[in-house]
Amino acid sequence: MKLYYKPGACSLAVHIALKAVGAAFDMEEVDTRTQRTAKGDDFSKINPNGYIPALALDSGEILVEAPAILQYIADRHPEADLAPPCGTMDRTRVQQQLNFTASELHKAFSPFFGSVPLKGEARDAALAKVVRRMDYVDGLLADGRPYLVGDKFSVADAYTFVVATWTEPTGIGLDRWPHVADYVARIKERHHVAEAMKAEGLVN
């Protein structure tokens, strides 16, 4: 397999999951602005939508969209226990969280990574959306649960963790969300998370 990624982007969640299941895979960085991979290939031919992650399977098939890829990895490696069994309420909750993170939380951060820096009212409006979504996550964690669904780390945690770390490069910080701050610090200590972040040059 080959993971097409961008350091610290949502592809990091897939990287974490692959590490967690002990999968054998290669990686190739993508410049999403130029649509070129590190080897000079046209990334738009790999994923016509032009964004990461993309996971090239040994069969030649290409998977895209983080929630789908994460569940594929979890289902292919049930022994790693990264997602509850299909058809259970906990699995539905994991899917619910993956969808929320993709369509609401991730989307709320997107304006901060645009080609034009956010300023004034535009930044205030974008920040307000991030605050609403992060308030929701902080509320989920306020009951003392260690992870978002049940008492086990899941692919939903991998994705939500990565997006929550974007508060650092955007300058938003986690001070107003103490439960999320504790959650992020705790997940960073997981060995496969640390390994993936180190491999992407995000930590020493």
Image (spheres, rainbow, N blue to C red):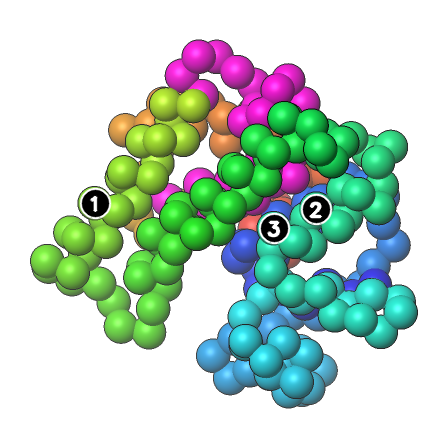
Q: Residues within 10 Å of mark 2 (few under 14, many from 20)?
A: many
The disc labelled 2 sits on which kind of residue?
A: Gln
Q: Is residue 122 left or right of residue 135?
A: left
- Residue contact at pointers 2 and 3, CB within 8 angstroms: yes
Left or right of residue 41: residue 164:
left
Q: Which mark is residue 71?
A: 2
Q: Residue at x 54, y 70 (%)?
A: 51
Q: CA distance from mark 2 to mark 3?
A: 6 Å
Mark 2 or 1: in front is 2
Task: Tell me the amino acid under the disc marked 3.
Answer: Pro
Quadrant position of residue 84: top right
Q: CA distance from mark 1 to mark 3?
A: 25 Å
- In reply to whether residue 58 is colored magenta, the answer given is no
On screen, 43 above or below 21?
below
Label at residue 67: 3
Q: Residue 30: x, y in percent?
A: 60, 73
Residue 192 picture location, percent across and down:
72, 38
SS under mark 1: helix
On screen, residue 86 above or below 142: below
**Residue to which mark 1 is pinned:** 128
Residue 19 in the image, given as x and y percentages of width and height: 77, 45
The mark that comes first in sequence, 1 or 3, is 3
Q: Is residue 114 above or below residue 39?
A: above
What is the magenta range?
A: 141-167
Q: Nearer the viewer, residue 32 or 78?
A: 78
In this rendering, is residue 190 above or below 22?
A: above
Dot 2: what SS?
A: helix
Label 2, label 1: how far apart the Cα atoms are: 30 Å
Residue shown at the point (43%, 52%) measured from the top left = 103
Residue 162 lies, in percent from the top left, at: 52, 45
